Amino acid sequence: MRTAPQEMEEMNGELIYKEKSDGMGGRAKRLIQAWKQIGKGEFISTGFYLRYKDLNRQQKQDESKMIILFRGTQEEKKAYQEMLKEELEEAIVVPIQQDQVKRLIHKFLIKKLKGACRKISGCEQVEQGNREITLQKVRTRGCRIPNELNGLCNIPRPQISISRHHTMPFWTKYSPIFFAEATESIFRQIRIHTQIKILNYCDDILLIHQDKQTLKIQTMEIMKTFEQFGWTISTDKCETEPKQIIAFLGQVCNLQEMNIRMSEDRKSKMIQALKDWFNTICKSKNVKIRQLAALIGRLNFLIYQIKEASLYLTEFDKARTQALKSELWDGIMVVNKVVFKELKWWIRRTRDYQPESLIHKMITGMLTTDASQQGLGATLIYENRKELIQHDCWSRKEVKMTNNAKELKVIYYGLLRFEHIFKKMQDQAILIRSDSTTAVYDIGKWKAKESLIERIKQVFYLMKRLKLQIITIHIPGKLNSTIDSLSRLCRSGDYSLKIGIIQTISKTWNYMPKIDIFATQYIKLINNYATVYLNDLGTHFHNVFNYKWSKVKLYIHPPIPVKVRLLQKMKQDKTQGIQIAPFWPEQSWNTKLKNLTTRFLSIGQANKILEMGQRMKDKDQKLPPDNVGAFLLDLSQMSGEICQ
């Protein structure tokens, strides 16, 4: 079924049903001028048409023209007659003669929870063709009825009249698409000419505005607007009085407390449905693939209330996908019991459900991360641009992870290692910046492919424990240079000051170091040096931590991982010397270093004053980002002076 020119002939082996020239049943055609004003005149004039799935379909349609008398109680018959009378009065259907019948649609009554009756059509979908189905839980007494689909003719079960649809029937497969396209044009005009915010799901419409009186007036105007385009408003189902607690699509929005929750009715129905599925799977009963897909859809619909919903549908999706490889949507399958774990989680999560906040919290911190083959790096900026830095190398197990897994892992580590800061920022939002599009998307949507599910769960539950709201954004790699340097940081110390800088520092402070510790024969700045490497043949001093440092002036440019141990050794031996270190405020070792320093001199940017070793270049490692400083320490008398 599709919009198309009015006169269509046989094409590609499909019999196209010829429509009359009165558009969508003719009812909207009389308002064609109004539709033309919003650019939908041609859409309404064209209408839609149905086509046969095969060339033998028309013959089977003719053979199935059998009127089945109504079977049911007098009360049900009366209810059906009243509904038909209402449709006739509203010109939804119009009476026709029996010889005008082209196709038949059988109608049934079912009772709703509150006792009222509802009329449904005896068809499931367009593609079924001439396949016969058994309709259950309706008053057919086991009668097998052809699954005939017709958008034109309607023979009701009570033998009262034969009628033709004068409007588009809503029970065909593609009717919601036409409905949505027609309504969206009107919604677009309303949004342009009013300040009303509109949320809609097919024919369920929610109007939002901050001013109660304005909302009330505009609601009535919007209802009149829809009527001007031929729509019928069910006033008995509408709530036109502005409220701060709104029930919409099974959700309850509390605009006073700014939260959203599942309605109790929906909650109880969902729990019961999940329990029924549990019993069905436990007993290995046959189910339709379509039924499993419907369950997945119902659970996915809860994503606004249960953000992690997609993370617990993996096994369901796998079962559905596997079944569809060999069957059609109406094929029969037995659901694998491996879904029990996810099913139990859904029952528990739905039962313990708590309202979800609608408030978008203020961003108070920015976490930027990057991962490389060598390691990880992260910076946190918060409270007037205070910046914290974290970096580390991967463990042997972590080195084997995929790039996407590493990017997610570094975000988790970033949140975990700055936990003491985030605990002070509870109920706030954190902006996470990453150059990985996969990490940004997966965390933003809380969904991922199966191999990354556990990584995403780690981040989600850490965020929940820290009571943070996370917002993700992608940044190009070229703008992520500082964090890229941290993730590729050379931690072994295979770099040194450029020639002449240490001499300038020594003259400035009138302090001449005698030995270069943590050096190698390739990066030494003083001929007398000590190293941490046992295979360096240029010196007799190996493993510098084995010697006492108290009787000589030192030049110290240590690898970053040993800085804390270095300061402890200097305090123990009451050492004096010049230490070179990146200026990273609020790092634990940086704070201790400042407290032990008698003089401090900022040398400049690392990439301008440091020389990389050959091993760094071969491994594509980076220098420490930001500024580098020279710290003069004299612990021989433990003077306790603070750095200048």
Image (cartoon, helix red, strand yellow):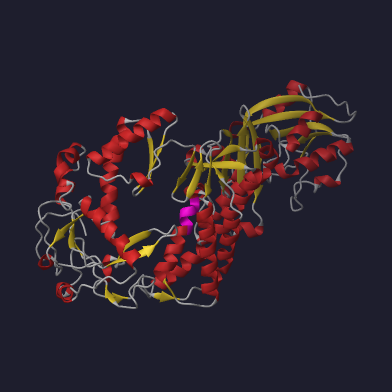
Residue 105, percent across and down? 23, 67
Residue 221, above or below 504: below
Residue lying furthest right: 637
Q: Give the image quarter of residue 96.
A: bottom left
Residue 126, percent across and down? 26, 66
Magenta part of the chain: 299-303
Q: Is residue 11 visible?
A: no
Residue 83, above or below 482: below
88 to the left or right of 73:
left
Q: Nearer the viewer, residue 587 or 223?
A: 223
Q: Is residue 13 visible?
A: yes
- Prevailing SS of the magenta stretch: helix
Is residue 375 found inside the magenta-colored segment of the image?
Answer: no
Q: Nearer the viewer, residue 555 or 8?
A: 8
Q: Nearer the viewer, residue 556 or 418?
A: 418
Q: Residue at x 35, y 35 (%)?
A: 219
Q: Residue at x 71, y 27 (%)?
A: 503
274 to the left or right of 177:
right
567 to the left or right of 172:
right
Q: Residue at x 15, y 38 (%)?
A: 33
Q: Give the image quarter of residue 588.
A: top right
Residue 543, percent across and down? 80, 48
Q: Quadrant of the C terminus?
A: top right
Q: How many marks?
A: 0
Residue 360, percent across and down? 53, 37
Residue 159, above or below 37: below
Q: Residue at x 21, y 60 (%)?
A: 1
